[in-house]
Every structure is written in C-alpha cells, then in structure tokens.
Image (cartoon, grey):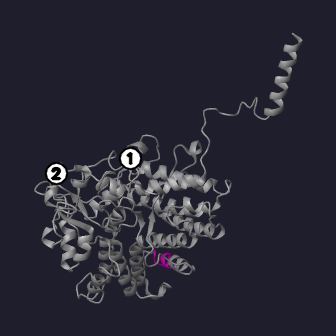
Amino acid sequence: MKFKIIICAAFFALAFAGCKKSWLDVNTNPNQLPTSTPDFVFTSGVARTVAYLTPNETGSYWSGQWTQSNTYIIDPARFQYQFNNTNFNFWDTWYDIIEDFQFVINNASDKGQPFFKGPARIMKTYIMQQVVDAYGDAPYTDAFKGVAAIAPKFDDQKAIYEDLIKVLDTAITDLRANQATNAQKPADIVFAGSTSNWIRFANSLKMRILIRQSRVAGRSAYITTEINKAAATTEGFLTVGLDVTANPGYVASAGKLNPFYENWGYNAAGGAQALARFPRPTTYLFSTLIATNDTFRLKRLAYPKGGEGVNPEIISNYVGVPFGASSGYLSQGTSYLGPSVIKKGEFGRPMYIMLAAESFLLLAEAKQLYGAAVNLPLTAQAYYETGVQESFRTTGATAAYGADKATTLLASGKDLADWTASPDKLKAIWMQKWIALTNFSGMEAWSEFRRTNFPPTPISASATAGSKLPLRLFYPSTEEGSNPNVPKGVDVFTTRIFWDVD
C-alpha cells in the first residue's frame, strides 16, 4: 500500500512539474484549430483571386467581347438581362478573399513576416475596387471586425475609392520598410518578393482608380495631384513586358491546372471540356478587328470555327456569334477562345491580374486629358503606341513573329488604331484598351464600357425590345438577409456607380 502511495505521489509531482502551465488551463479550446501563418494565407488569397473566373466571364459578356454558342440554351440572366439578387453573387467570394488579405495585414508583423503587409494591402485594394465597381456603396470601415460589427455599415463608394489610394500609399511605405527574405519569396506567387515590382503594380492600380473617376465633375485637381505622387516614385508604373500574373505552380492534375485552361479548355488528360463549347467571341469583336486589318490579334484571341487544330487559320474560318443570339450558331460552326489564353498541353501558364498594356493606355489617357498638369515624361501618343505594342505581346507577338504587325497597325491610317489618323484620341485609347482586355480582364472591360460608353457594342439579340443595359449588380440576398444596413431601392438599370456619369 505504501508503495502504491509513493508511486501516485511521484506521478502527480512529475505531472505538475512538467506541465504546470497547461495541466489545468481551462482556457484552451481543444476544438479550435491552430492559426495559419501570413505567408500561406497570402498565397491562398492570390490563388483564389485568379481562380475566381465568374466576374471576368460576366464582364466579358456585358462588355461585348464574348457571347455564348447555341449548343446551350440561352442564359436569360446574362443575355436577356433577367437577373435578381440571387444571380451574380460575386460579393460573398470577394469579401471572403479580402478577409484572407486582412488577416495577413493584421498578423504579418507579429508573425515575423512583415513583407507580406504591403502586397496584401495591394491585393485587398484590387478586389475592393471591383466590389465598388459592381455594387456601389459597400461595407468598408466596419468590415472584417468579426463579432464587433456583425452588421457593418455601408460606406459611400466615392469615399472608399479615396481611401483605397491611401491604402496603396501605405502599402508602398510597408514595402520600402520590409524586404522579403529568401524563405518568404516562394510564397509570393506574383513577383517572388520583388519590392520594386509590387510598387509598380500599386502605382498602376492607382492609375486605374484615378482614371475611372476622370469624367466626374470637379475631380481633376485631386486626380492630377495623385498621379504626380505616383509618377514621383523611383519605380514608376508597370514597364514593358511586366504584366501582373500569378502562378501557384499549376500541374496536370484535376483542380490544379491553370483555371482558365481547365474551365474552358482541356482536362488533365487533354480531353476537351464541356464548357469549351460555351463562350464565343462576338461578331462585333471580329468586325472591329477586321476593320483595321488587325488580323494578327484576331487569330490569337480566337481559334477558327471548330476549335484548336480543326480548320486553317484563314479569316473566312473565323466565325463570331452576334451578341446574345439564341439560335443558328452551334459550337462546331463558330470560333473558340484562342491561343492567347488556351493551347492544348499548356496547363501551367500563369493567370493574369493586370496587364502592362492597360497600364500604358491609362498613362496615355492621363496625358491626353491633363497634359502638362501631370508629370509624365512621354507624350500621350508614345504611351498609346507602347500600350498597343504590349497588347500584341500579350496575345502572342514576339520579336520574330507578329511584332511588326503592331507597327503596321499603328501606321495604318485607320481611325481608332493609328494615333495620327484618329480624330478622337480618347476613343482610340478606349478602343485599344477594350481590345487589350479581351480574354484577360472582362470585369475591367465592363467597368470601362460603363464609364466611357465606348465602344458602342450592340445590345443583346435575345433581349426584349426597349431593354436597357445593366449598370451594376443587385446586392446579394445573402447580405440582405443578414445586414439591415443594405441600401434600399437599388435599380440595376438606373442606379449608377458614382463614376458612371452618363
């Protein structure tokens, strides 16, 4: 008995000596998973951002770049504008991804990974602008507070835009103060830890936000001041050949291929996907390119009818579909999305976040609008022509193949292509930006179409007579059902986003 007592006493003494800090810690929740680290969350957030295809798909339709083949029954939400607060719920996914980046912002320093704060702020800004562009007023200052704000207030959309510029300034400050370590660089699947390139992206994103407001009365002084701040940085804007892309390491396995490739191209075994028969370039896109003899980009943006490798690359084999046509254009008789984005076997291509072509065309518009008031060293024409050349590069031109086609286009004497021959320089910029964004950034193309009303793409052939184009999206039912602060009385055909003046 004494021996048993001694053994028990020794056991308890050892237990309290070795585990006294946690033995009776009733505050530890055994059901709570350990928290991830900022680097992993950042990588996941970027990968999720580029894998979320639906906003860019819808934007590609509503900007007149894509439509659908008649192999499928017509989609009434997209092509008859019959949608409500259960369609196009980009809101939940966007906010969920932004929450990843907010986690990084809140925890990167404490976890010894301060480099990721700057890139996370930039990515948060990138998505938050799209939230405003699609929905208008939105939770911002009260968002991401958890139980402290379970029904966050909605901030004014213009105020959000202004604060996003400040967030980008903070991001640049963070980047200058915190270099990536060699161990952290692989988690940055955008620029592999390049501080300079992240700052260039931040400045180009500023240009997107600022030029979006350029048609709003009374904004010129604010816009030019902010452009000059960005131009004064050593790094400047996206440079020739520097697109913003992401690649977490796509491999030939289901769910791990380039998302664009896997959705509208091929599966891991090389078989054509069912949805490859759905999206179709529009006849308006083709006629616009043919009008300026821009057949190089046409043949890179699309495949001939029947898809990759079926028919020769001659113009008569490129068959678009009238926007919203509900019959007469089956998949086998019309053009597929082209080699600029899908080529069999090339499942490991990066996904695009922002194009250098767009950045140069934004600079062209800024210089054309504000002249000497902005400290941009080149002429509007020089920025414009570089933007067009960058678009050719993105679609597949190289020094040995296709680059001369850009030079020919820019000296063609054609309106909306040749700078000198274009009476309305802004419309030339807008047209070339619309073409450059095709296949790569549909959401941005739709926002620019609403801002400029150009190019004058036709209304859907399936829409009823007198139909209006949608100007925005409904707040989703998920938010309306949980947040009493959702603005009331939104009409998607008359309630404009603040930068959409006409």
Identified by mark 2, the residue type is Thr
Secondary structure state at the residue bearing disc 2: loop
Q: Which residues make up the magenta segment?
A: 219-224
Whether residue 307 appears in this view of the structure is yes
On screen, residue 149 versus residue 213, left or right, reads right
Residue 479: give x, y in percent of width and height: 43, 45
Q: Is residue 105 magenta?
A: no
Q: Farthest residue toward the top? A: 1
The quadrant holding residue 456 is bottom left
User: Which is more toward the observer, 498 or 312?
Assistant: 312
On screen, residue 194 versus residue 317, left or right, reads right
Q: Residues within 10 Å of mark 1 (few under 14, many from 20)?
A: some
Q: Residues within 10 Å of mark 2 (few under 14, many from 20)?
A: some
Specify which label sits upstream in the sequence, 2 or 1.
2
Residue 306: give x, y in percent of width and height: 17, 60
Q: Which residue is mark 1?
A: 476
For image coordinates 47% across by 47% down, the residue present is 485
Between disc 2 and disc 1, the foreground one is 2
For image coordinates 54% across by 61% down, the residue present is 188
Q: Farthest residue toward the left? A: 328
Whether residue 141 appears in this view of the structure is no
Q: Which mark is residue 153?
A: none
The quadrant holding residue 217 is bottom left
Residue 77: give x, y in percent of width and height: 25, 50
Question: How far, Cα to Cα, is label 2 from label 1?
Answer: 30 Å
Q: Which residue is mark 2?
A: 71
On screen, residue 48 versus residue 420, left or right, reads right
User: Which is more toward the observer, 7 or 470?
Assistant: 7
Q: Quadrant of the C terminus?
A: bottom left
